[in-house]
Image (cartoon, grey):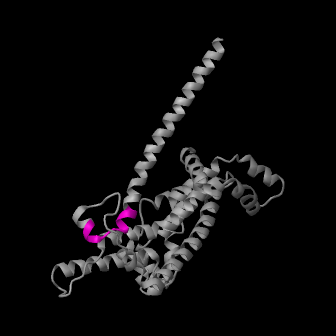
Amino acid sequence: MQTVSTTMKSDKGTQSFTILGYGVMTIVTVLCFIPFWLIIVASISDEQTILREGFKLWPTQLSFDAYRSIFHGFNALMQSYLVTICITVAGTTLSLLLTSMTGFVLIRQDFPARNKVSFFIYFTTLFSGGVIPTYILFVKYLTLKNTLWALVLPGLLSPWNIFLMRNFMKSIPYSLVEASKIDGANDWQIYEKVMLPLCKAGLATVGLFIALNYWNDWYHASLYITKESLYPLQYLLYRMLSNAEYMKQAAAAGVFLDTVVLPSETLKMATALVVTGPILLVYPFVQRYFVKGIMIGSVKG
């Protein structure tokens, strides 16, 4: 009877903890969703209503002027989407290949210089060549101005991603590498057949970081791209926001006789949705790998 009573109390305690946990997570989820909902509402609200009444959880007066401004140049927007997708796919694929290969080399116990190479990679996080030498290298010597490679190469390798991948690969027993060598496998076969299938979580985690970096990059386009047909999405929308803000300030200063109401505030919100939409669609597919990968990569030394 005492065992049954203890079990019932344990079950009640587990149920209470589960209910409390779900309740807390529901509240946290709602609190995290509210800012995103405010962005959605603001993007379809009237500009003057927002300036007069502030942001609300429900639109007082609907207006799609912000989306009309964004999709006014539909062809240019689609071209920028295509450029960004190409950069993200190509850059993420190449970066994952090089990052995983570097991480694999750094865990090899038969590579005596692995600690020195690791220090050299870490050293680049403290000091860099700077903007001007990098610009001269890309434009004068590599002649990459107005090419997609100018947007791919700068984010190809990251010390943080390399160390994250190395730490994740350390969680895999090294005896598998030694057993593969005994069976006659070469280094490429060990990397391709043994390590990569066991690193799906790490690859998904690092791949998400890399993809987000390429997707959100506008800075390198401002340095190396002057052809409008090669504008990535972020840089195109950045120029649209800058132009809208300039036109609004000029109209307020009386530069233009025929002043118009420009949706600068709602345009910012609509731009945020246009930019983050595709990433939000991709994230659920890699979430389970992402959580596992970031936990293992962060605790293994």
Please identify the residue farthest to the front as the structure is shown. Answer: 61
Residue 207 shown left or right of residue 47 in the figure: right
Image coordinates for residue 122, horizontal then vertical, percent = 49, 57
Q: Is residue 40 magenta?
A: yes
Residue 273 occupies quadrant: bottom left
Quadrant showing the N terminus: top right
Image coordinates for residue 184, horizontal then vertical, percent = 83, 57
Residue 117 appears in view:
no
Image coordinates for residue 110, horizontal then vertical, percent = 69, 53
Residue 187 shown left or right of residue 56 in the figure: right
Residue 48 shown left or right of residue 275 in the figure: left
Q: Is residue 86 magenta?
A: no
Residue 120 shown left or right of residue 45 in the figure: right
Query: Viewer-proximal residue, 107 or 40?
Result: 40
Residue 94 appears in view:
yes
* Main SS, magenta residues: helix
Q: Which residues are magenta?
A: 39-49
Q: Is residue 94 above or below residue 146?
A: above
Image coordinates for residue 185, horizontal then vertical, percent = 80, 59
Quadrant showing the C terminus: top right
Query: Viewer-proximal residue, 41 or 99?
Result: 41
For the point 16% across and 80% down, the residue is 253
